[in-house]
Structure formats: structure tokens, C-alpha cells
Image: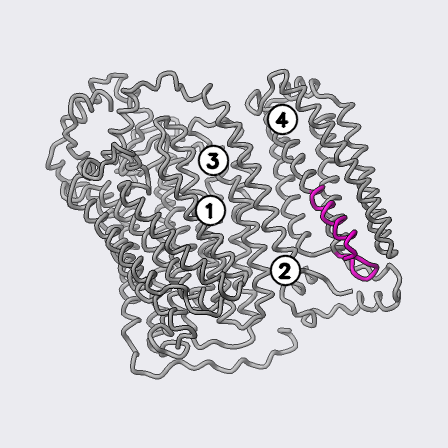
Amino acid sequence: MHAVAEAMTGRPDSFPLPERRAQGSAAGAAQERVAWPPGDLAIWIFILAELAVFAIFFAAYAFARMGELELFVTYQQTLDTNLALINTLALITSSYFVVRAVGRIRADDAGGCIRWLAGALLLGGVFLGVKSLEYAHLFGEGVSLSTNTFYTFYLSLTFFHFMHVVMGMVILAAVAVKAAQGHYSREVHTGVETGASYWHMVDLVWLILFPLVYVM
Amino acid sequence: MLQYKSQAVAKPYFIAAIALFIGQILFGLILGLQYVMGDFLFPEIPFNVARMVHTNLLIVWLLFGFMGAAYYLVPEEAETELHSPGLAILMFWIFLIAGALTVLGYLLVPYARLAELTGNHLWPTMGREFLEQPTITKVGIVVVALAFLYNVGMTILKGRKTVVSLVLLIGLVGLAVLFLFAFYNPENLVKDKFYWWWVVHLWVEGVWELIMGAILAFVLIKLTGVDREVIEKWLYVIIAMALITGIIGTGHHYFWIGTPEYWQWWGSIFSALEPLPFFMMTVFAFNMVNRRRRNHPNKAAMLWALGTGVMAFLGAGVWGFLHTLAPVNYYTHGSQITAAHGHMAFYGAYVMIVLTIISYAMPMLRGREAANSNRSQVVEMWSFWLMTVSMVFITLFLTGAGILQVWLQRYSDDPQPFMVVQEKIELFYWMREVAGVIFLIGLVLYVISFFVGQRQPEASAKPLPAVSPAEA
Amino acid sequence: MSQVFTKAMARNIFYGGSVFFILLFLALTFDTIKVLPERDNRANLTEKVAHGKAVWEENNCLGCHTLLGEGAYYAPELGNVYKRFGESKEAIKAFIASRPVEGIPGRRSMPQFNLSEEDGRAG
């Protein structure tokens, strides 16, 4: 919280953080100069808020499931776990790509950064495509938000997450464009870290959502 | 002392706001008495008429306050004179006369007759809560709003564009645009209610929060001298949270009106987070005041600015959360719990933010350098405490009434009829009325504060004490 | 490296977040409007019902009553009035028609609205 307070008050000297500074200077110009958390602090406030929403959503899911266990188990079986598994792999891999993208820009390699981001975007596209297939199948069967409590949750949670993937892709694309315009370098690349942080959050939420809704 | 001459147009707006505020409270007291003395002023002013006057006056005077705030702060933010002070004054009179005629219409003729006289059957929009105004008055509101937005927008366009004025403008545009849904009144009751909330909820738990945030940010910049960059960052984060939680939070009104059940989940989840922006507003206000770089002589304005954060969080945040979850709301919906929440939320968030900007701006509008005399400020601060504490009690008594009502009428094994229960909780209504009288005394003191200590010198700011290491 | 918290990022979150949630809200609205016909009994929305809604509005009934819990809390909910009056339209009409013009001493009373026979039927 000190870091938040410091950044929000614009008075860095009001919270001297000797240890961190010492570390920073000892590590010199190497990558260890990375501040924590990486990226813009504003995105972390946002990420915390988003995680809070998802946490409450998951808790509500668990609560509703307790009440209608049989219904949830029955309709869970109508979901395509294989497609969801593909999507899980796609997102995990894309997160790895994003990590590589950050690594490249820290090495002053904007071209590499853009290529890894493009890879991540491609996998994001795969996720959206596969998810759309799943939706198309279910809608074809006449399933809607109002079919039953399970589908209310399934569609609400996954669609809400789906929109986050779209949002994350917009952010990554914007980062890639800025990288292409030469805005980022070894010294200045907060934007890349910001986008990466958001994307990891989207990935993380899916990693909870997948076992919770499809498997358990 | 005004930085820009045209800021002076804010003065009549603020005066009208306070005058209508007094009217609102008088009718509030009539309503409170009618709760315990059913035949009070019957049939001259039946409850429904008094309530309409009470709520409509509230909305109108808050709008006067918002407009006055915009006319005061936009020139200073944009660093230029207002685009057209003449238009602002013209609109002031149009709005005031239209408002007065509407209220007179409520009081002098039966509502059905008013509907007939104003041709409601041609385009029926009347008779819905808070939107009781005749259609012609609604058109008038739109005209005034458009002229106002034009005036303020042009001023911002030609001058410096700051985050504060931009956020204020977004809030005001949103206010005007969402009001257009007041003109949509389908015969289908579910659809009617669904879109009615787009005006009511998306106002008070959406765009009005932007207006409130912008006014608070402006006053805090002026009072604390904290770097604008810092305050504007906070402002963005707060209003982002307000819209992120508030827009889907509309769902907490879609629990029981025929809309699909999934709203019970969406509405509960997102509105559970609606206290967040209000909490941040409180932290923001206290944080900025703690880090102030100067002591402003206007202590009263500072008190209002801090008070609005706290009371908005309590009223809108805590009391809203109290009954926002669908399983709770199943029992509390449309009970005195709602009334309790409504009173403190409106007072804490919107009444107090308007009184904050009035408190800050009025001394300058009346020719002072920066603040009123000490004596005037002391009276004003008394009025702050009287109104605020009595509002806390009004809320507590209504909450007590609500809990009992829900228990006796809906929750117990042997539910009793509405009117039977009303009589059983009469004591709480009496206590609420007493608290209401104290609120009125606070309001009278508030008005008096404008007339005392006028010949005395301005309060001076004590120099900021040296910052001790512990505090830093 | 000192911490960054840029105004530009806070601004982007405001705009991005707002657009995101407006779109989500519109998507849910779209779904709601799509399924409403199955829920709101619109087949029974005759001219008489519409007239009843107009009577409700033009006499400002929600200035005292609630309908589906929305309105004022001075008088009872009207969504269930038919049940409470023993499922008798006549009883409701008779109640409305018999309200004393001068009220009831010491008690809350519904005003006398002088509804026409036609309005009474629709209301």
C-alpha cells in the first residue's frame, strides 16, 4: 500500500523505502531494477477490483450450486470439456508469450516484443473462436440465460470473462502498436508491463473458472 | 473576489437552490406529520401531492446547485469567461418559472386535472415516481439542459481543458441524455419500469457521481493546494469505479418487476461493490486534507467537503448495501428501509456536495476575498452538525421502523396487514418527525449564517504548522 | 525505478471500463427484451389495461401506494390488491368510490378521485 499511497499523493519522499532503493542500486542497470508491482499502479487497482468482482461471482456460483447440486452436476455434463481444455492451453500459452514479450522489450528488442505479442493475440483469437463455437452449439440447443440457474451462471461467468479476453486483446494490440511506433525501450516499457499484468489477470481468472464450472 | 466576472451568474442559481431546499424540507415535515396524523391538511394537501412537491423540489434544487456549480467552476477551470452569461441568466429565469408553475400546478389543481390541462394524453409521461412533471415541463427541462450544456461546453472548448471540467461535462451530458428516457412510457408495465430506472438509477448511482466527484475535486484543489495531477488521478479512479459498479448495479432494481431472474445475481454482485467508489471518495477527501499544502480560511467549506464523503459512504454505500442483496431485498423491498436509505444517500451525496460548493463559492460571489468571517463560519458549522446529526437520526428511526415493518408485515409467522403495522410503528415516525424539526432548525441556522458577521473581517488562515517527522 | 501511476492510465481505465460495462449492460438489456414476451403477459395487454395504467398515472396513485414495491410507502401495495379484496373487482371499485371527500378524522384516507364508471372499470 505504501507504493500506492506514494504514487497517488505524488510525494515519493514521504515514504522512503530504503531497502528497495538499496536493492535497485546494487543490481545496477540489470533487469533486477524492476519495480513491484510491474506496470502502472492504476492497472493494479483496476485488477484488484476485477478480481473482487470475479471472487464474488465465484462465491455466488458456489452458493447457488450448493442449493441445486443435482441440477448443476447434470447440466455441467452438457458442456464440452475438451474445447475448454483447448482454451485453457491457449490462454496459458498466450500468457507465456506475453512474458516473453516483456522479456524482449527489457532487452531492448521491440521487434521481438511485437512478435510475441502477435502470438499472444493469435491465441486470444483462438480462445474467442473456440468459445464462440461452444456458444453457437448451446444456443442452437435453445439454451439461454434464463434456461436454469446453472446456465445463468455458466453463460454469465463465461461471457463476462469472454468480454475480458476481448478487452485484454484490445490492450495488447494497443501495446503492440505503440511498440511498433517505437514508444518502448529497455528503460521505458511500463506500458508493456501494464498490458501484460492485465492479460495475466484474464488468464488467472480462466484458470479458476475452468475447473470450477467445467470440471468440479 | 471572483477570478472571472461571469462566474457571478452562479449566485442566483445558488440562492434559488437554497430557497427551494427550504420548501422541500417544509413539505418533508408535512409528510412526516401525515404519517402520524393521517388527516393533517386533508383534503387540501393530500399526502401524494406533498410527496411530489418534496421529491420534485429536491431534484430541481439539486439541478440548480449543479448548474450553479458548473457556472462557477468552469470559467475558473477553463481560465476564460463564460461563453454567454446572458443565456445563463435567461435559462435561470425560465427554469425557475417553469419549476414554480409546476409546483403551483401540483398544489392548486387535482393531479388528474393538471394532466388534462397539460395534454398528458397526447404524450403520457406523468404519474411515475420522480417524473410526475407534466410533459411540457419535461420538455422545458430538456431545453434548459441543452442551453446549459451548450453554454458550458463552448466555454470549455475555447479555454483550458482540465480533467475536472471534462468529468463534470460528461456527467452533465449523461444527465441530460438519460433524462430522455423520461419521455418513453410504454403501456407494458415491465418495460415502463425497466427504462424508468435508466433515468433514476443511472442518474443517482451513475452520472451524478461524476458530477459529485468533479465538484469535490475542484473544491479540494482550491482548499488544500494539493497538486492538481494527484487529485485528477484520484478523480479518474473514483469515477471509473462508480461506473464499473453502478451500471450493472442497475440490476438491483430488476429483482421483482418481471425481468429475468439472472438480474438477481448480476444486480446483487455488482451493487455489492457500489459502496467502493463512495468509500474511495471519503479516503480521497481525508487524504487530500491531510496532505494539504496550505490552510484555507474557509473552514466551513472544508467541513462540508469532508462531511459529504463520509455521509455519502454511509448513506449510499452502507445503507444501500444493507438491502441490496436479492435475498434480503426480497423482504425489505418497498419498505421504510428504502426510505431510510433514500434520505441519507441523497443528503450525504448530493445535498452536501451542493452545500460544499455553495459554502466554498458564496463568499467570493458576495465580494469576500476567500472566506466569510469567523462568526458566520461558526454559525454555518453549527448548521452542518445540526442537519447532519439529525439526518443520521432520521435514517436510524426510519431503519427501526423498516425493520419492524418487515418483521410484522412480511417475516413473522403471522403477517399482519399494512395499516395495522403502520400504527404499531408510529413511535418511530414521531421520533423521525422530531429529528426532522431539528433538521429544519439546522437549515434555518444555515440561512442565518449568510447574514451574520458580515461587517466583521474575513477569517484568516493560520499558517500551516511545521510538518513533524512522525507525520511525514 | 520509482513507482508509476500515470493520469493517462487512470483515464484509460475510466474510458475503457465505462465502455466495457455499458456494452455488457446493453447485452443484458438485449437479452431481457428478448425474453420479456415470455414473462410479461403482453397478450393480455388490452386497451382496457392500458387505460387502467393511464388512470393509475393520471391520479398519481404511486404518490401513496407502491406497485411491485415501487412508489410511496404511505399506503398498501397494489400489486396484490385483487387478492386482498377477495378477488372481487366490485369490492375494489366500491372502496374507491366510497372514500369520504373530507377524509377520516385522525386517520389516513384515500382522496375521493371521482373516477368515472369507465375509469373505474379500467382502473
Q: Is residue B139 left or right of residue C18?
A: left
Question: What residue is disc 2 on?
Answer: C7
Q: Amino acid at mark 3?
A: Val
Magenta residues (range): A168-190
* Label 1 vs label 3, nearer the camera: 1
Q: Element at badge 1?
A: helix
**Spatial distance from mark 4 to mark 2, Cα to Cα?**
42 Å
The label shown at residue A65 is 4
Asked if residue B262 is among those painted magenta in the image, a careful observer would answer no
Q: Residue C80, can we see it?
A: yes
Q: Amino acid at mark 2?
A: Lys
Question: What residue is disc 3 on?
Answer: B328
Quarter of image, res B409: top left
Chain designation of label 2: C
Question: How many residues crowd mark 2 within 10 Å: few (<14), some (14–19), many (20+)?
Answer: many
How far across and how far down the image is residue B135, in percent? 28, 40
Q: Amino acid at mark 1?
A: Glu
Q: Element at badge 3?
A: helix
How far across and how far down the image is residue B424, in percent? 28, 38
Question: Of A166 and A174, which appears nearest the observer?
Answer: A174
Question: How many residues crowd mark 3 within 10 Å: few (<14), some (14–19), many (20+)?
Answer: few
Quarter of image, res C75: top left
Mark toward the start of the polypeptide (1 vs 3): 1
Quadrant housing the N terminus of chain A: bottom right
**Spatial distance from mark 2 to mark 3, Cα to Cα?**
39 Å
